[in-house]
Image (cartoon, grey):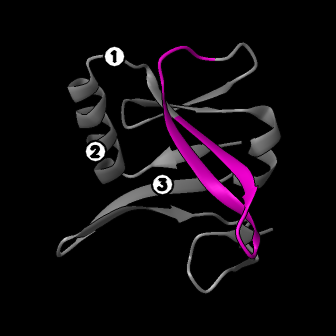
Amino acid sequence: MSITLTQSAADHIGRYLEKRGKGVGLRLGVRTSGCSGMAYKLEYVDEPAANDLIFESCGIKVYVDPDSMAYLDGTQLDYTRDGLNEAFKFSNPNEKATCGCGESFTV
């Protein structure tokens, strides 16, 4: 099982945690949403849950709940900037399809 970050994503998350002045890492999960069924959920973690799976990549801890792990195993999170647009990009080997707007995916 693994979740990884690119250096760009780790740098962005690290800067944001430093700016917040608190937090131990990033929580990556999935929720039911969109036309394809699943959507990624990101939030900063101040207090880990007892059952969290913890991955460390590029010096940043990534927390994943066990239910989401089945959909996320092997995912790499990147952070990109293109002109004025910036966003996290997910490279998930479990994705079978994504919706046209890019908000949701199916496995």
Q: Are marks 2 and 3 in contact (CB under 8 Å)?
A: no
* Picture quarter with the N terminus: top right
Q: Is tag 3's residue or tag 1's residue first in the polypeptide sequence?
A: 1
Q: Is tag 2's residue or tag 3's residue first in the polypeptide sequence?
A: 2
Q: Amino acid at mark 3?
A: Leu
Question: Residue at horizontal 63%, vertical 63%?
Answer: 92
Residue occupied by mark 2: 12
Can you say whether 78 is above or below 48 in the image? below
Local crowd at mark 2 within 10 Å, few (<14), some, or many (≥20)?
Answer: some
Quote the CA–CA distance across marks 2 and 3. Answer: 11 Å
Provide the residue span drawn in magenta: 27-48
Nearer the observer, 7 or 95? 95
Find residue 68 and report its horizontal and vertical position in percent: 76, 44
Can you say whether 21 is above or below 58 in the image? above
Disc marking residue 77: 3
Question: Residue at horizontal 26%, vertical 42%?
Answer: 11
Find residue 87 and report its horizontal and vertical position in percent: 36, 62
Local crowd at mark 3 within 10 Å, few (<14), some, or many (≥20)?
Answer: many
Q: Amino acid at mark 1?
A: Lys
Q: Nearer the viewer, mark 3 or mark 1?
A: 1
* Picture quarter with the C terminus: bottom right
Q: Main secondary structure of the magenta part?
A: strand
Find residue 97 and report its horizontal and vertical position in percent: 72, 80
Assign a secondary structure to mark 2.
helix
